[in-house]
Structure formats: C-alpha cells, structure tokens
Amino acid sequence: MTSAPVRFATRLNSFASQPDAFWPKGHGKPSPLEMAARAATARGLTDVDLNFPDHLGPDPRATGNAIRDLGLTVNGLAMRYYSNPAFKIGAFTNPDPAVRREAIDLTKRGIDAGREAGCNLMTLWLGQDGFDYAFQADYPKLWADEIDGIREVALHDPECLISIEYKPNEPRSYSLLPDCATTLLALKEIDLPNLGVTLDFAHVLYADEQPAFVAALIGRHSRILGLHLNDGYAKRDDGLMVGAVHPVQTIELLRQVRKDGFHGPIYFDTFPDLTGLDPVAECEANIATVTAMLGVVDKLEGDNELSAAIARQDAVASQNLVRRAMLGR
C-alpha cells in the first residue's frame, strides 16, 4: 500500500451468491474453482483466500495452478474446524487430548497444503476455542493449551506466516482470543517471528475497539499480516460492504496501516451471499470504495495541517480537514 499497486483479495464463498445469474439454472452448488472463475470476472480483483480443508482438493498444487491460470493469486488459507463435530467445544483447547491433537495436525496439513498451493499465509480464527458457562472451563489450562497449540503450528513451518484473527464470540459465547489486547498478550507469550494479527474491521467494531488505534497497537507490539475490510453496526459480524456505516473510521484505518508499512492485499470479508447480492458487483463496489478512500488518504497525507491538528488534538480542525478531503467542501 506504500508504493506498489494495491492488491485486492476476497472471500471465495461470496461468489456462490445468485448462482442462477452466472451458471445455468439448476446448476447446483458451485465448486471452489467455479467460484474462483466467477471471482476472476470482478474488475480489479487480484487475489483470493481459500478455506482449508473446504476449498483444496487432494492436489493443492493443481488447485493453486488452476487459480493462477484464471489470473488470480492465492493470497492465503484460512483454517476451518468443521470436519469433526467434537471441535464444537474446542480445537486447540478441546478437553479430549485426541481431538486436540487432531485439530493441531489438521492445521499442520493446512500449512503444508497452502505452501503447495503457492502461498505462505495461514489465518487462524479459533472461534471454537472458548467457553459458554461459568464453571465450564479451567481457564489457566484453556489458555495454556491455546498458547501451546499456536506455538506448535507456528514452529511447523517457520517460513509460513501464521496470523491470528480475533473475534469477541461466535460460535462460543466467549472466545478465548476476543480482542486486540488479549491476542497481543498471547503473541508476546509465544514470541515467534512468523506470528502476527489479522485485523477484521467488523470484529474490531464488535469488540468495541477503534480500528486505527488497534492497528497502531498491533504495529507497536506485533504486525498486521491480514487486513479484512467490511462494515457493520457493531452488534454482530454483519459483513456489510466497505464504508457502508463507518467511512471515516475506515479512512483513518487505511491511513494508519499505510503509515505502518502494511504491504499485503486488502481482503474483503463481506457477505453478499447472506442477502443474495450480485457478488461480482459487490466486490467491484468494494474495490471502488477503497480506491477512492486511498485517494482521500493521499490528500490528507499531503496536508501538513492535519498532522499539526492531530498533534494538538484539535478535533474541530481535523474534522474540517477530513470533511474537505472527503466531500470537497
């Protein structure tokens, strides 16, 4: 985001929305490669993220090559712990040592598959690791198991980046890694160079955090390995289009990550499939919105008055400058 052209990635499952608009009526559920082919028609899209094990068949190398043949890059993989119903009460924190081992080994296979597919980023959203009731969990053991599990998978391939995506809850009532501070605490305890954080805009709002402040904290204590843009009303993970509810906060976040040197793709973790939107049009709208917002960031960075206003915490002056950059008056 500093000098090279901006890359844009997206959630592959979004492109199952409105299937009859792209495939013959009655086509059935599209395959991962069919969804990728549809995604490739979105102007400006450069990358896709794949879920493991859902989106990779028996030959990850062939899947990666097929996606590249479409003109896209595999940005990274995201683990999904659905293959065993027992994961519902924990993946890395499961009380059954055999199930816990299964989750860790599955993650290692995902890392290997990602490398075969041509990427070196694995995102861990450990939504199953948490608790629902008082007196349900041994909290010190839960924490120790989580730390040990993340450490083991990070050591599996030190050249693969492992990014932790936090979220306050869902599916568990309380997630073990619910917010920025707790996630940074875990990463500090593990202390491995290939670890970092995935900042999901809607998750940050849901955690009652300020996106740009969170980005600055991550930049100080770790690094952002994934930037997921979307929007919502901070009551749940809405997955709305970028800037639909919080445009100013999104622009401030983009300014912050640019200042901190984030170079990865901007990933759209939005849910057009939930309400039947055209996923190609929705993706292109997100790309156009972020491109325009980065133009606003350029204007703001070229105005020394904003830095001066921020230095003296002059909210009126800064809001006037941001308004003029956004609206022209």
Image (cartoon, rainbow, N blue to C red):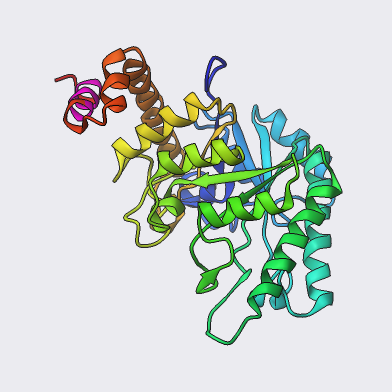
Which residue, as the protein is rendered here, is positioned at the far left? 329
Q: Which residue is at 70% across, 56% downward?
A: 54
Q: Residue 270 in magenta?
A: no
Q: Which residue is at 63% across, 75% downward?
A: 139
Which residue, as the protein is rendered here, is positioned at the far front? 312
Q: Which residue is at 30% across, 37% downward?
A: 247
> Taking the image as drawn, is residue 131 in sight?
yes
Point out residue 175 in the picture as x, y percentages from the top left corner. 55, 67
Q: Residue 322 in magenta?
A: yes
| Apparent side of residue 90 relative to residue 100 in the rendered image (left or right) | left
Q: Is residue 176 above or below residue 42?
A: below
What quarter of the picture does the C terminus occupy? Answer: top left
Q: Is residue 124 above or below residue 73?
A: below
131 or 85, nearer to the observer: 131
| Apparent side of residue 66 relative to residue 127 in the rendered image (left or right) | right
Which residue, as the protein is rendered here, is positioned at the far bottom? 135
Point out residue 277 in the picture as x, y percentages from the top left corner. 39, 49
Q: Quadrant of residue 299?
A: top left
273 or 320, nearer to the observer: 320
Q: Which residue is at 63% across, 42% downward?
A: 49
Q: Is residue 4 above or below residue 284?
A: above
Point out residue 141 in the picture as x, y percentages from the top left corner. 71, 74
Q: Is residue 129 above or below residue 162?
A: below
* Magenta highlight: main SS: helix
97 or 292, nearer to the observer: 97
Point out residue 38 in the picture as x, y percentages from the top left corner. 56, 39
Q: Which residues are magenta?
A: 318-325
> Taking the image as drawn, is residue 27 in sight?
no
Q: Quadrant of residue 39?
A: top right
Q: How many marks?
A: 0
